[in-house]
Amino acid sequence: MDGSERLKGRAVRGGLVRILLGLCLTYTGIIQADTETEVKGLKSDIKALQEEQLAIKQELLEIKRMLSAEEPSNKSEKKAPAEPPLPITMNTIGSPFMGQEDAPVVLIEFTDYQCPFCRRHFEQTYPRLVKEFVETGKLKIVLKEFPIQKLHPVAPRMAMAAQCAGGQEQYWPMHDLLFQNQRKTRMEDLEDFAQALDLDTVRFRQCMEQGEYAHQIRADFDLGVSAGVRGTPFFFIGPLNKDEPGRVTVEHYLYGAQSYGAFKQSIEAYLDKENNQAAN
């Protein structure tokens, strides 16, 4: 049994143990419940447990898919480089961004709206980055679409929905809704999101049907491939180019749902460098 099989076996066994333990505890609680309030509370606990089970299953499937995708179908195939060929100059013109246009540090994120690890970043790290660095004018976040259709067949549709909302100045609110409701992928769901954001729904539907931003999404994806992106979320970090703000030379990268501390360390290293240069 190789490392990949051991990893999958360990992940599956761990997930099953958690599910079975939770079900046993829930069953015991139901037997002991003797009031309507307790029963309602237990029903709520069961619902939360079911949601957790679904999340565990989704992550286990994602790990399995990623491991399968990394196995070369032909041994003669050229493997992707272990490290992105840094430094890389990236064009950010036309891409949605959050923060001040002249923020001293730029974080370029390649994301997939159906990726559970991207959702984890959105839930656990992204809010702190926005509060601590974006809102204080220290960081600009640039978003690049990287829908991995082989793993997530509807991811391109979600990327298109975000871009179509961006065409009506609502990219980031749609970005949030897509991650908050990751299992809602039907066109009817996306139209509901558009309506909730007070978008012109006719224009939104036309944008989706005509694939108005297909070229932009393809360009983002191709840029990611050429830069060595091998999964999502994937982040590149670099200083602002004051002479050409639309072109960023990235010098560092982070892969996966990294902790807030990992981002903080990288961002503050550039801020310290900027402050030292200003002082000299």
Image (cartoon, rainbow, N blue to C red):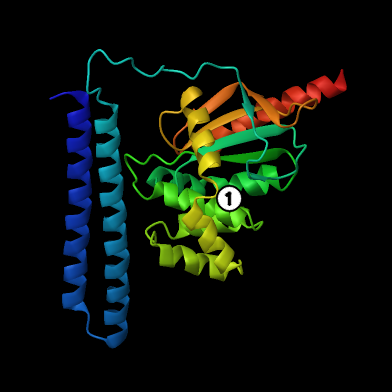
Visible in this render: residue 123?
no
Q: Nearer the viewer, residue 247 or 232?
A: 247
Q: Is residue 5 above or below residue 161?
A: above
Relative image position of residue 140 (x, y in whole percent): 68, 39
Q: Residue furthest bottom?
A: 36
Q: Nearer the viewer, residue 244 or 29?
A: 244
Relative image position of residue 94 (x, y in whole percent): 66, 40
Circle 1 — which element? helix
Visible in this render: residue 35?
yes
Question: Which residue type does callout 1 highlight?
Answer: Pro
Q: Residue furthest left?
A: 1
Is residue 13 left or right of 131 when viewed as pictured?
Answer: left
Q: At 39% across and 39% down in the image, what residue appears?
A: 148
Q: Are there few (<14), some (14-19), or many (20+) residues within 10 Å of tag 1?
A: few
Relative image position of residue 182 (x, y in whole percent): 41, 56
Q: Residue furthest front?
A: 210
**Where, quadrant-wise, is the N terminus in this rendering?**
top left
Relative image position of residue 189 (x, y in whole percent): 43, 66
User: Which residue carries the number 1 mark?
Assistant: 127
Q: At 58% across and 50% down in the image, what residue appears?
A: 127
